[in-house]
Amino acid sequence: MRRLAGKPDASQGKRRPNENCLKGKRCPKCSSYGPFEIEVSMTILLSDEGRDDAQDGSIEFNDDSRAKCYNCSYSRRWAGFNVRRSR
Ligand SMILES: [Zn+2]
């Protein structure tokens, strides 16, 4: 698993609302705004010689992908990390 090296904030969790990749996302347990670990699927080019990047090597995930809070290790599907609007 890749770590966010050189970012001391990562272990504490982000405290300000997200505005970019994680817009609308927040841990429902510890209220951290991330970062989060997400299980992704990716297409690779596999030959007898080994593995290489496919032409369409895009990484894919969706609301049903498994996600985990980096701060408290809370784990559930990615859709469960949506910020709930207060009524
Ligand atoms: Zn959390």
Image: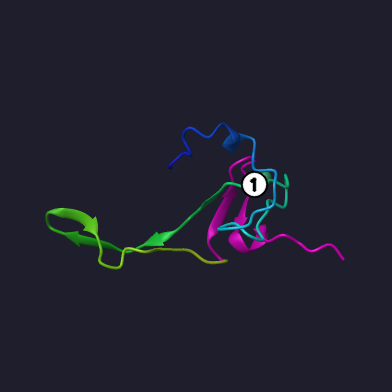
Question: Residue at the spot x=56%, y=31% of the render?
Answer: 8
Task: Find out whether residue 8 is within the magenta segment.
Answer: no
Horizontal side, residue 48 vs residue 85: left or right: left
For ligand 1, the image quadrant comes to top right
Q: Which part of the image, by quadrant, shows the N terminus?
A: top left
Q: Which part of the image, by quadrant, shows the C terminus?
A: bottom right
Between residues 13 and 17, which one lies in front from this camera angle?
17
| Residue at the front extreme, as displayed | 19
Is label 1 in a helix, a strand or a loop?
loop
Q: Which residues are magenta?
A: 64-87
The image shows a total of numbered marks equal to: 1
Question: Residue at the spot x=65%, y=43% of the render?
Answer: 14
User: Disc 1 marks which residue?
Assistant: 74
Q: Residue 81: give x, y in percent of width and height.
A: 66, 57
The image's colouring method is rainbow
User: Where 34 falls versus 53 (above or below)?
Assistant: above
Task: Find out whether residue 70 is within the magenta segment.
Answer: yes
Horizontal side, residue 85 vs residue 77: left or right: right
| Residue at the right extreme, as displayed | 87
Between residues 60 and 21, which one lies in front from this camera angle?
21
Kind of residue at badge 1: Tyr
